[in-house]
Amino acid sequence: MDHMLGARIRAVTVAFLSGCLALTTAVFAPPAQGSAGGAGDTPPRTEEVDWMNRTYDITCDDEVDEPVPVTMSNGTGSVTGDAIGPERHWEVRIQRIVHGTLPRLGTVTAVLFRCEPQPSNYFTEELRVYRTRGGAEIGRTPTFDVPSFSPEFRPETLEIQDDRLSADLAFYGDRDPHGRPSILRRVTWTWDGRQFVKRSETDLARTDLGREEVTVDGIGPVRIGMSAQEVEKVTGAPLTLVGDASHCTDGTLAGTPDGLSMMFMQNSLVAVTVESPATVSTASGMGVGTTRDELFDTYGTEISTERTHDGSERLVFAPTAPRFEGRVIVFDLTDGQVERFSAGTRDATTVGSCS
């Protein structure tokens, strides 16, 4: 009996030790070469790419034939040397970085560069795409074949969506002066297996603000509080901005009447201003040339009188409804008639522009 019990104990012990050995082998043995691994396997670790602080090879949109290295620090860098020509240098900055997935490529990162070749009075832009894991370059979008100035990216619109890389760009018309492109288009690119190719170039639907009405909320689809990019999107027209975009900027929209302008504070629309020769009017029909009496007849107790620093008369329409709180229309008068008016926030409308 003791002999049989001892045999059973030895058999259990051997089975237990064999199980432990098998488990140890399964845990620590490397997978067979070429195997795909199980669904729960952890992917191999790859060093994370610091996109704002690394060296890129770029041409500044074919300013040179062969790409030259530019080392970026916090998204900015510069280039000098024989590779770009004597007595020249580039100032380069990253305008936007987006991540996404594209067919046949997987997870990618697109980087939009802005280059200012010096000495010059122009800039170029270049869009390149990289492997998100590891940062290896895949390719760049092709240069635009246009008869005049190259189109200008709207960086905030760059995205990877619906299996495509896409962005809005402002294109120059035949008579557009430098710095004032008038055509806003949506452009898309795809990967054809060897390179990025343009798939579409579509004009955005245009809104004629010359036919819209001004209210304390803005004009037509343009609303107080919108960013410059949102204004371009809802109107389908490029904005030309003058001033410090991080503080105060004046903007004019391509295709709108002369005399219609917009004021942005920290990239937020704060005022829309109308002056001659624009004929745009308010929702109540008030505009340039309207008389003092007509304003009082129209707005009644919601309008008040002020004096400007030079003694001119100013009438302020401030609707009493709670939803309009803080927004007004200010009418500046000369000889009893409206010379110009601004709609928007109280502080901005009394100034009307950043200049």
Image (cartoon, rainbow, N blue to C red):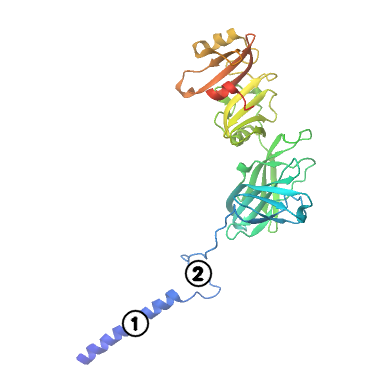
Residue 245 visible at all: yes
The amino acid pointed to by label 1 is Leu
Residue 345 visible at all: no
Q: Report helix, strand or loop for mark 1.
A: helix
Determine whether, in the image, residue 106 is placed left or right of residue 67: left
Position of the N terminus, as image quadrant, is: bottom left
Q: Which residue is mark 2?
A: 37
Which numbered disc flags the more N-terminal residue, 2 or 1? 1
* Residue drawn where x is 77% and y is 46% of the image: 145
The amino acid pointed to by label 2 is Gly
Report, in whole angstroms, how far the alpha carbon at label 2 lies from the one at label 1: 27 Å
* Residue drawn where x is 58% and y is 7% of the image: 293
Q: Which residue is mark 1?
A: 17
Q: Quadrant of residue 133?
A: bottom right
Front: mark 2 or 1 = 1
Determine whether, in the image, residue 199 is placed left or right of residue 219: right
Residue 179: mark: none
Q: Quadrant of residue 139?
A: bottom right
Q: Give the image location of residue 106, x and y in percent.
A: 59, 57
Determine whether, in the image, residue 284 is placed left or right of residue 210: left
Q: Quadrant of residue 3?
A: bottom left
Q: Residues within 10 Å of mark 2 (few under 14, many from 20)?
A: few
